[in-house]
Image (cartoon, helix red, strand yellow):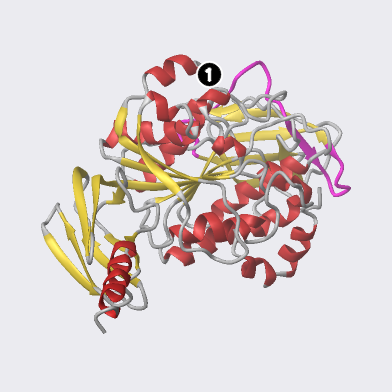
């Protein structure tokens, strides 16, 4: 027995040394928690049923929970915007999270135009990088990761915004956050979950696609490649599902170019993604997105125009908004470098609709209704209360068709928030299209200088 005691002592000592409490990567130093909400602090322990106590410095309150089979989770109220704070997690060991802020948290997701960094291409990049000293804007960058099943952790790291960190982060997301912080002066947390070249299907729960024949057929048109994920659900599983316990203010999204191959299904897949994410988080958060810009694609005729039209149609979902970019695109560069304006236009939606800032016009003109008068069609626009303007001599990119569904270039006249459209070749018009091509560069704006969205009044197959 005396010989056995030293052996047992060594065993228990080594067990205690290896015992560990750990958290998901997103709960770490420098993070931003959603203000005035209930934050979930969760994690795991190797001591399966030990008592865990979470202490938050903003109220010095202790919240206790007993781990179950090595898993634990508590909910704590978060204060109004401010900080820095600490969060202490204590069981058989102690974990302290430092430099924690309370503020506004936004998921920033999509493909390469959202992922694009200042180092990859940005107007006035050197100056923008040098001026990026905003320590209360925080970046969380998820490592790219796909998974066949929903996962509980997504490796990544929080960092304060500085010239060094900003130059490697999403330019669109940074300018979105900078505009918001400069207006309402609260900490902003940006959660970067992107993968360049990806279609929408990997970002959605696979069961959402499996339950809809249209989405199933659309997913079959996505070709698998070694460079980016294409299978339904595999990015949702690896890069969205691990975030579901982390409360957020909303989502900004920039994606769509890679769905030109199944553009018609985007009318269903895009709203389905938004709905599925909201259901997963359990809240109808704002979802603001970018309408893809004109570009000279080598392999299609109007597929990008269909994606843009599907993005326009998705505005029918509540609490959504769209930044229109057809005036700041680059026909020779699928990654336009004026990310400042893209971020600003997304921020206009958030400031006006989420944060209640008095911005009378926060969107470019959007098609509202039409009326046929003799041989002309009258188009009425939303977000043009102060009037529409043409930048140039004549309005461009309007076409008009009769019952034969043949579209002809049309003339257009602006009156207030209405455009009168006609063509001598169409005596009995029934439909109008505007900027409905991959490379359209229209010149219709509202008085505030925001461009009008492409649209069509028909539902004919392009």
Question: Which residue is at the front of the view, 14 or 3?
Answer: 3
Residue 387 in the magenta stretch? The answer is yes
Q: Position of residue 407 (x, y in %)?
A: 83, 39
Across the whole image, how many numbered discs are drawn on residues?
1
Q: Residue furthest bottom?
A: 1
Q: Residue furthest front?
A: 3
Task: Report the residue at 36% width, 38% height from top.
Answer: 159
Q: Quadrant of residue 178?
A: top left
Question: Which residue is at the front of the view, 397 or 421?
Answer: 397
Answer above or below: position of 316 versus 327.
below
Q: Secondary structure at mark 1?
A: loop
Q: Image check: 371 left or right of 318? A: right
Q: Position of residue 453 (x, y in %)?
A: 61, 37
Q: Position of residue 430 (x, y in %)?
A: 77, 47
Q: Please indicate, yes or no, whether residue 456 appears anywhere in the rendered image.
A: no
Q: Quadrant of residue 74?
A: bottom left
Provide the residue designation for mark 1. 123
Question: Which residue is at the front of the view, 143 or 70?
Answer: 70
Task: Report the residue at 51% width, 63% height from top.
Answer: 151
The segment highlighted magenta reads: 383-407
Per the picture, the main secondary structure of the magenta-coloured stretch is: loop
Q: Please indicate, yes or no, whether residue 196 appears anywhere in the rendered image.
A: yes
Q: Residues within 10 Å of mark 1 (few under 14, many from 20)?
A: few
Residue 457 in the magenta stretch? The answer is no
Task: Report the residue at 63% width, 38% height from top.
Answer: 292
User: Which quadrant would the N terminus be assigned to in this image?
Assistant: bottom left
Answer above or below: position of 373 versus 55.
above
Answer above or below: position of 161 versus 404.
above
């Amino acid at each position: 027995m005396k010989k056995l005691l030293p052996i047992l002592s060594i065993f228990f000592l080594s067990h205690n040394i290896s015992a560990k409490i750990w958290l998901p990567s997103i709960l770490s130093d420098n993070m931003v928690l959603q203000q005035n909400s209930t934050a979930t602090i969760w994690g795991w322990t190797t001591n399966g049923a030990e008592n865990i106590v979470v202490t938050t410095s903003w109220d010095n309150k202790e919240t206790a929970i007993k781990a179950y089979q090595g898993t634990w989770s508590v909910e704590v109220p978060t204060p109004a915007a401010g900080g820095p704070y600490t969060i202490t997690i204590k069981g058989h060991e102690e974990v302290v999270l430092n430099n924690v802020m309370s503020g506004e948290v936004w998921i920033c997701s999509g493909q390469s135009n959202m992922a694009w960094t200042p180092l990859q291409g940005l107007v006035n990049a050197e100056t923008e990088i040098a001026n990026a000293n905003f320590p209360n804007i925080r970046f969380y960058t998820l490592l790219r990761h796909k998974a066949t099943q929903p996962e509980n952790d997504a490796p990544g790291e929080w960092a304060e915004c500085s010239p060094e960190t900003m130059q490697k982060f999403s330019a669109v997301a940074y300018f979105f956050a900078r505009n918001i912080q400069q207006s309402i002066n609260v900490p902003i947390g940006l959660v970067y979950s992107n993968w360049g070249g990806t279609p929408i299907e990997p970002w959605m729960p696979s069961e959402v696609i499996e339950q809809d024949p249209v989405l199933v057929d659309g997913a079959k048109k996505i070709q698998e490649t070694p460079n980016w994920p294409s299978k339904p659900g595999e990015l949702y599983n690896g890069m969205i599902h691990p975030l579901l316990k982390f409360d957020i203010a909303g989502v900004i999204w920039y994606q769509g170019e890679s769905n030109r191959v199944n553009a018609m299904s985007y009318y269903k897949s895009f709203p389905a993604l938004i709905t599925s994410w909201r259901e997963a988080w359990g809240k109808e958060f704002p979802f603001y997105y970018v309408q893809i810009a004109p570009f000279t694609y080598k392999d299609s005729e109007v597929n990008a125009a269909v994606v843009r039209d599907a993005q326009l149609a998705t505005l029918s979902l509540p609490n959504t908004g769209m930044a229109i970019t057809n005036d700041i695109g680059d026909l020779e560069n699928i990654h336009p470098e004026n990310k400042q304006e893209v971020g600003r236009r997304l921020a206009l939606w958030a400031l006006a609709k989420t944060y209640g800032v008095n911005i009378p016009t926060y969107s470019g003109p959007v098609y509202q209704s039409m009326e046929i008068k003799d041989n002309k069609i009258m188009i009425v626009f939303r977000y043009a209360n102060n009037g529409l303007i043409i930048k140039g001599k004549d309005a461009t990119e309007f076409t008009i068709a009769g019952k034969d569904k043949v579209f002809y270039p049309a003339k257009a006249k602006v009156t207030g928030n209405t455009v009168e459209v006609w063509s001598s070749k169409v005596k009995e018009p029934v439909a109008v299209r505007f900027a409905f091509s991959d490379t359209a560069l229209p010149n219709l704006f509202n008085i505030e200088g925001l461009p009008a969205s492409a649209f069509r009044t028909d539902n004919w197959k392009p």
